[in-house]
């Protein structure tokens, strides 16, 4: 994954390309970022999610969740997210921050649900809210779909538990680790300017 680490526009192009590739395949490391929210006590909460969409034009990053999950309530209380991406072979870290919107009963949620595979939809058939106490180890899935991929029609009941988390990137913080000297840069967008401010930072 060679790129010019001394040219800010090239770095930004590379990052969006890398994010886009991570939505088309499960192989790129950016496919599984850590998404962080803030709970009602002001404490940070992080978890690994699947990056479902990265749109440069709207600066949008999207993932899916069960609407009963704690992070949904956390984002309703504090609608701002931090994402952490790391590519070990490339030694590239990307931190992204920005405001969040939640989608459950709208066109975006419908489109994302329709694009999901039956295997992914199976998670939303969970009879109990994620994080609820359990008496014993449990996959939190109906008996009928345990151990197999359900048919599309079997997943319909999961739609009511499905939600989309959409984040508009306001800042990229990029770090490249290298034995000859690290590189760090920041890209920041404002509502009044579609082009980001680009600046070097000390690593």
Image (cartoon, rainbow, N blue to C red):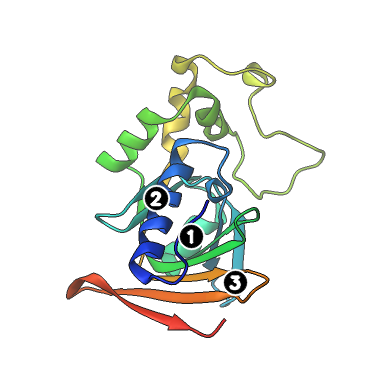
Query: Mark 1, residues whose alpha carbon is within 10 Å: few (<14), some, or many (≥20)?
Result: some
Cα separation, mark 1 vs mark 3, equals: 13 Å
Query: Mark 3, residues whose alpha carbon is within 10 Å: few (<14), some, or many (≥20)?
Result: few
Q: In the image shown, does 105 or 169 lie closer to the viewer?
A: 169
Q: Are marks 2 and 3 in contact (CB under 8 Å)?
A: no
Q: Are marks 1 and 3 in contact (CB under 8 Å)?
A: no
Cα separation, mark 2 vs mark 3, equals: 29 Å
Residue at horizontal 24%, vertical 54%?
57
Q: In the image shown, does 72 or 87 lie closer to the viewer?
A: 87
Q: Which residue is mark 2?
A: 17
Please provide percent x and percent y for residue 144.
63, 16
Q: Residue 73, which numbered label?
A: 1
The secondary structure type at the circle numbered 3 is: strand
Please provide percent x and percent y for residue 22.
48, 44
Kindly tell me whether residue 79 is visible in this rendering.
Answer: no
Label 1 vs label 3, nearer the camera: 3
Q: Sequence-wise, which precedes: disc 1 or disc 3?
A: 3
Q: Sequence-wise, which precedes: disc 2 or disc 3?
A: 2
Please provide percent x and percent y for residue 42.
56, 77
The secondary structure type at the circle numbered 2 is: helix
Kindly tell me whether residue 154 is visible in this rendering.
Answer: yes
Q: Sequence-wise, which precedes: disc 2 or disc 1?
A: 2
Q: Quadrant of residue 46?
A: bottom right
Q: Residue 195, which numbered label?
A: none
Residue at horizontal 73%, vertical 49%?
133
82 to 190, vertically: above or below: above
Residue at horizontal 44%, vertical 51%?
19
Q: Residue 44, which numbered label?
A: 3
């Amino acid at each position: 994954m060679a790129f010019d680490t001394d040219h800010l526009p090239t770095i930004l192009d590379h990052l969006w390309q890398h994010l886009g590739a991570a939505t088309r395949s499960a192989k790129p490391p950016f496919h599984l970022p850590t998404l962080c929210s803030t709970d009602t006590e002001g404490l940070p909460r992080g978890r690994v999610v699947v990056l479902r969409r990265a749109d440069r034009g709207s600066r949008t990053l999207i993932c899916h969740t069960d609407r009963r999950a704690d992070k949904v309530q956390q984002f309703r209380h504090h609608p701002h997210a931090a994402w952490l991406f790391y590519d070990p072979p490339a030694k590239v870290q990307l931190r992204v921050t920005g405001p969040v919107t939640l989608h459950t009963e709208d066109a975006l949620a419908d489109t994302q649900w329709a694009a999901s595979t039956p295997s992914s939809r199976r998670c939303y058939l969970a009879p109990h809210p994620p994080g609820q106490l359990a008496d014993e180890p449990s996959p939190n899935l109906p008996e009928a779909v345990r151990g197999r991929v359900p048919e599309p029609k079997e997943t319909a009941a999961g739609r009511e538990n499905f939600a989309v988390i959409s984040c508009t990137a306001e800042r990229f913080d990029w770090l490249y680790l290298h034995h000859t000297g690290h590189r760090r840069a920041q890209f920041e967008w404002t509502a009044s300017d579609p082009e980001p401010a680009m600046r070097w930072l000390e690593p």
